[in-house]
């Protein structure tokens, strides 16, 4: 990390970070969208005017403001305006509907709710009124503005909870995750430090800005002073023109994004998909080693993958100058200040190289949850967050994730890692994507089910063919799938496009 970026990373609040960057490079662009450009100076000045407009609406320090907005320049302006006031904001993914939105509004006790109006054919404002939301206003293209002289002084503390993010809630009600400005700055600093970026880079936001990755990425832009292209609706190949026009050097999002770029590259392997691109980076979902090797070989760019979650936006990150073996098979190393502890079933720390549950402590870790009982259950006696992820730390400090505690299949008393089988399946020439789940079985307890998404034009796979392939790869017999399902597309969420395994279990548990 450069000296300037390191100094900016010491900012107490997000608003202080905005002011310090704007003072350094006011005319340099920070956000690019279509034909529009927002500079760092304009981010500061316009956000302050919007803050004044919100203040005149009644938004005060500590006021809870929910917003459900797409990835747009206006969304960034609104969120920094709220940071200028010191309001508590709760971003909601724009694809969520009545159940998740209603829950978030009730639990957060939001006093205002910003919507995009009608977006992608759905009337968010009508839903807001149907749910009885308070202080509803539209903030898609027009934001309230006023004279900043009405504003009180900016918040001085960065350790007050001012952010409520929501876990996906795929199997139950979402959890409200509590963050501070400092925890978000720490997460973004980790990302920036690992990727070795410079002011000459051009990034991209192809994910919902309401995701925890939104501030993570924006902090990185503020620390290093380079811009990013925002995509309100991301789809390939449609988005390629924007990547090429703006000369994007860093792209990504998660494993699903890497696969989408690969698919496009394979349509014309003789020329580089995005000439300016030098790095794919992301996290939020497992990355099979074969995906790494395919990206580097076929796209001729580097791929770095990391580990993060709503509770801790950035935990570890691969570095572009690391070894290919570490980049392919690990999640990278933690930054200074992030403690990783691997423990056994009794909560005792295990040596390097030994698998156990991953626990975390550091400034980027959330303050807990809205529900105090959930907070009490989430941390151990030493203040480490209990992640539910399984893995080990190599002697080099690199973290290897081997699955989730709930993603371990127990077949006839034997533990089977779904991720181990998935990594092997991704190496099969016909497999585009794979998910392995455990299904209830009266005889075995659970049986192993492989669900595949095949590459276009590939022949159908049979279960005997699949098990023969896995045997040839050295997979133990007791781990072999007993059920094979082929889908045109695996079910995914709308944020980082993670595979929704609970839907697969529901569909094939018969």
Image: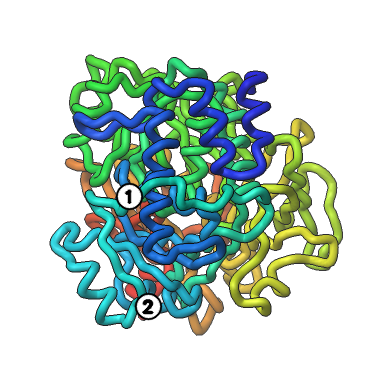
Q: Nearer the viewer, mark 1 or mark 2?
A: 1
Give coordinates of residue 105: x percent, y percent: 42, 75
* Residue at (24, 75) in percent of width and height: 127
Quadrant that contains the C terminus: bottom left
Q: Sort mark 2 into few (<14), some (14-19) or many (20+) by Cα contacts within 10 Å.
A: some
In this picture, residue 128 sits left or right of residue 401: left
Q: Mark 1 points at which residue?
A: 145
Q: Is residue 473 above or below residue 478?
A: above
Question: In the rendered image, is residue 405 in sight?
Answer: yes
Q: Is residue 264 above or below residue 465?
A: above
Badge 1 vs badge 2, beta-carbon distance below 8 Å: no
Q: Nearer the viewer, residue 319 or 137?
A: 137
Give coordinates of residue 201: x percent, y percent: 43, 20
Q: Mark 2 points at which residue?
A: 102
Give coordinates of residue 335: x percent, y percent: 69, 35
Secondary structure, mark 1, is loop
* Residue at (73, 48) in percent of width and height: 362
């Amino acid at each position: 990390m450069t000296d300037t970026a390191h100094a900016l990373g010491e900012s107490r609040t997000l608003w202080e970070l905005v002011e310090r960057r704007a003072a350094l490079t006011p005319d340099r662009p920070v956000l690019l969208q279509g034909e529009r450009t927002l500079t760092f100076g304009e981010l500061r000045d316009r956000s302050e005017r919007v803050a004044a407009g919100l203040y005149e609406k009644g938004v005060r320090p500590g006021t809870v403001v929910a917003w459900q907005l797409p990835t747009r320049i206006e969304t960034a302006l609104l969120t920094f305006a709220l940071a200028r006031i010191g309001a508590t904001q709760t971003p909601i993914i724009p694809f969520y509907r009545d159940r998740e939105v209603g829950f978030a509004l009730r639990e957060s006790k939001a006093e205002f709710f910003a919507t995009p109006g009608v977006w992608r054919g759905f009337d968010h404002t009508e839903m807001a009124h149907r749910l009885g939301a308070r202080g509803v206003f539209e903030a898609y293209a027009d934001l309230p503005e006023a004279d900043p002289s009405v504003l009180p002084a900016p918040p001085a503390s960065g350790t007050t909870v001012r952010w409520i993010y929501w876990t996906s809630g795929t199997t139950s009600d979402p959890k409200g995750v509590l963050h501070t400005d400092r925890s978000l700055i720490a997460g973004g600093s980790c990302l920036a430090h690992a990727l070795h970026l410079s002011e000459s880079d051009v990034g991209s936001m192809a994910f919902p800005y309401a995701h925890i990755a939104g501030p993570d990425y924006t902090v990185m832009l503020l620390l290093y002073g380079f811009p990013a292209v925002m995509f309100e609706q991301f789809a390939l190949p449609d988005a390629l023109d924007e990547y090429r026009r703006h000369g994007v050097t860093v792209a990504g999002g998660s494993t699903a994004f890497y696969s989408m770029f690969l698919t496009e590259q394979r349509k014309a392997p003789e020329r580089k998909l995005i000439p300016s691109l030098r790095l794919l980076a992301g996290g939020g979902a497992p990355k099979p080693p074969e995906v790494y090797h395919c990206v580097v070989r076929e796209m001729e760019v580097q791929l770095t993958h990391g580990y993060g979650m709503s509770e801790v936006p950035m935990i570890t990150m691969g570095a572009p100058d690391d070894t290919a073996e570490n980049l392919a098979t690990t999640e990278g190393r933690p930054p200074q200040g992030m403690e990783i502890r691997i423990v056994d079933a009794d909560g005792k720390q295990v040596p390097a190289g030994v698998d156990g549950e991953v626990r975390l402590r550091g400034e980027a870790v959330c303050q807990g949850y809205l529900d105090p009982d959930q907070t009490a259950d989430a941390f151990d006696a030493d203040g480490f967050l209990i992640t539910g992820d399984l893995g080990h730390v190599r002697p080099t400090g690199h973290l290897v994730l081997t699955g989730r505690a709930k993603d371990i299949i127990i077949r006839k008393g034997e533990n089977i890692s779904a991720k181990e089988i998935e990594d092997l399946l991704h190496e099969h020439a016909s497999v585009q994507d794979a998910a392995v789940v455990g299904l209830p079985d009266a005889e075995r307890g659970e049986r192993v089910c492989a669900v595949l998404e095949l590459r276009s034009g590939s022949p159908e796979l049979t279960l005997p063919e699949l098990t023969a392939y896995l045997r040839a790869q050295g997979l133990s017999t007791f781990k072999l799938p007993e059920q094979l399902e082929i889908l045109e597309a695996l079910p995914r969420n709308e944020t980082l496009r993670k595979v929704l395994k609970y839907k697969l279990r529901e569909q094939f548990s018969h």
